[in-house]
Amino acid sequence: MATEKVDIGWNFDNSYSRLPDIFFTRTEPTPVRSPELIILNRPLAADLGLNALALESEAGVAMFAGNQISDGAMPLAQAYAGHQFGHFTKLGDGRAILLGEQITPKGERIDIQLKGPGRTPYSRGGDGRAALGPMLREYIISESMHALGIPTTRSLAVVTTGEPVYRESTLPGAVLTRIASSHLRVGTFQFAAKWGTVEELRALADYALNRHYPDVETDENRYLALLQAVIKQQAALVAKWQLAGFIHGVMNTDNMTISGETIDYGPCAFMDTYDPATVFSSIDTQGRYAYGNQPYIAGWNLARFAETLLPLLHDNQEQAVKLAQDEISKYMELYQSNWLSGMRAKLGIFNVEDEDAAIVENLLRIMEKHKADYTNTFRALTIERPDETLLVERPEFKEWIQQWQARLGRQQESIADSHQLMRNSNPAVIPRNHRVEAALDAAVDQEDYSVMEKLLDVLSTPYEHSSEQDEYCKLPAQSNQPYRTYCGT
């Protein structure tokens, strides 16, 4: 029986559906048995211009589950391709359906997507469903990333379906409602370049420019400007990942957005002990997407993006390749500039000196050598309690402290100013892996969501540096087993 309609506040448009048909397939969600709202992001709902009370109603929950389609929505599954661990394949939204684009009170255009609402034409044998644990994990991590100031897709709600999903074991099913500036991916362009016409590729590029980079519309070579803009955004994004100790886990080209937002939180995690070789993903057996490799993989992915644009960059193939190569060659310098600037801020440094990179690298070398915690080391320096680190008795760390303090003394800003900059740049709390697992275990195994709610509350103000956060700064108990994450498909 249809639920009573209520005014939720949807203001849908469907600009993606006006692209050539090759890029999507109209697809309806598959209704579920008995949906139940688990969590609603009320502040995000308000930003989107939505009525939170209405979203919590029977009609709102039915929409989140895919049982009811709101007026103005036009459900579709997007087509894309991607290099998965270096191997190219045709993909698409196998378990995601785009409802449309919410036009917010500020005039922003935001994708509204259901993740786990059933099979699509791109499911490739999958059931199109999602389990509760991975959907709550994406909710926790994406909202933490937002609080940290890292561009990201976000989570509006999670509902359970009342139906099981079958993986290695039987798990409760769920649907996540995800919002994004768009779901345009490098893989979307790869799909167009491989299976579309040049005009279909051009239509996609024009759409990306209009939606994300309208300020470059008047440039002489607008498609070169698109490449430049995406390189710039990704260089800034990956630098923010590295500065926070975030490990995406699966940096396939279909998981890199044109907007520069982090997307697809599968086997992601935050690093505890500083080690560039850190890998958490159970499927990344070769360490392709290790923490220290992320900047280089981003450059590799951007090169694949540049290849898709060659027919648009210049009529002469050789000249097009040269234009693309020239831009890709600038990526690493852009990344390094963003990263070093961020590291200066983490150390309270306002101005620029040639030796700054060496100061940063020396600290990281000491941290790696002595297996120091990444986040807590910077936190201890920030709150002026270096004695709280494992490094405090190490002679090379004491020497480094002297060099760092001398560096701070060579700038106009006061020590108080430096520490305020550090407080704004170094989170006291991150979604520690053991804390996330504890929250998920309580939610999935005991239907106790209070652990997750408390964790989300603490993570919402990572730069507060309050005494209430101290408990969440503690490291997990020692274990002989390495921490592993899973894609959650």
Image (spheres, helix red, strand yellow):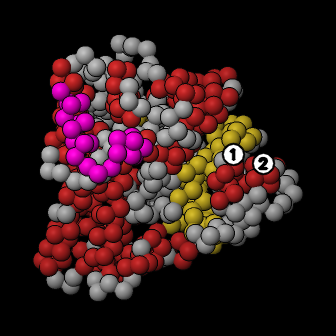
Q: Position of residue 467 (x, y in %)?
A: 55, 27
**Residue drawn at x 14%, y 79% as measured from the top left:** 319
**Residue 364 magenta-drawn?**
no
Q: Is residue 47 visible?
A: yes
**Residue 402 magenta-drawn?**
yes
Residue 17 drawn above or below residue 363: below
Q: Is residue 298 visible?
A: no
Q: How many marks?
A: 2
Q: Position of residue 426 (x, y in %)?
A: 40, 40
Location of mark 2 (residue): 56
The region drawn magenta spans: 399-421
* Dot 1 crowding, Cα within 10 Å, few <14, some 14–19, many 20+: some
Residue type at mark 2: give it.
Glu
* Dot 2 crowding, Cα within 10 Å, few <14, some 14–19, many 20+: many
| Quarter location, residue 217 | bottom left
Viewer-side residue, 104 vs 361: 361
Q: Are marks 1 and 2 in contact (CB under 8 Å)?
A: yes
Disc 1, SS: strand
Viewer-side residue, 431 vs 423: 423
* Prevailing secondary structure class for the magenta stretch in the rendered image: helix
Residue 407's disc number: none
**Residue drawn at x 46%, y 21% as measured from the top left:** 474
Location of mark 1 (residue): 40
| Left or right: 42, with 413 as reference point | right
Disc 2, SS: loop
| Left or right: 103, with 399 as reference point | right
Q: Position of residue 13 (x, y in %)?
A: 63, 73
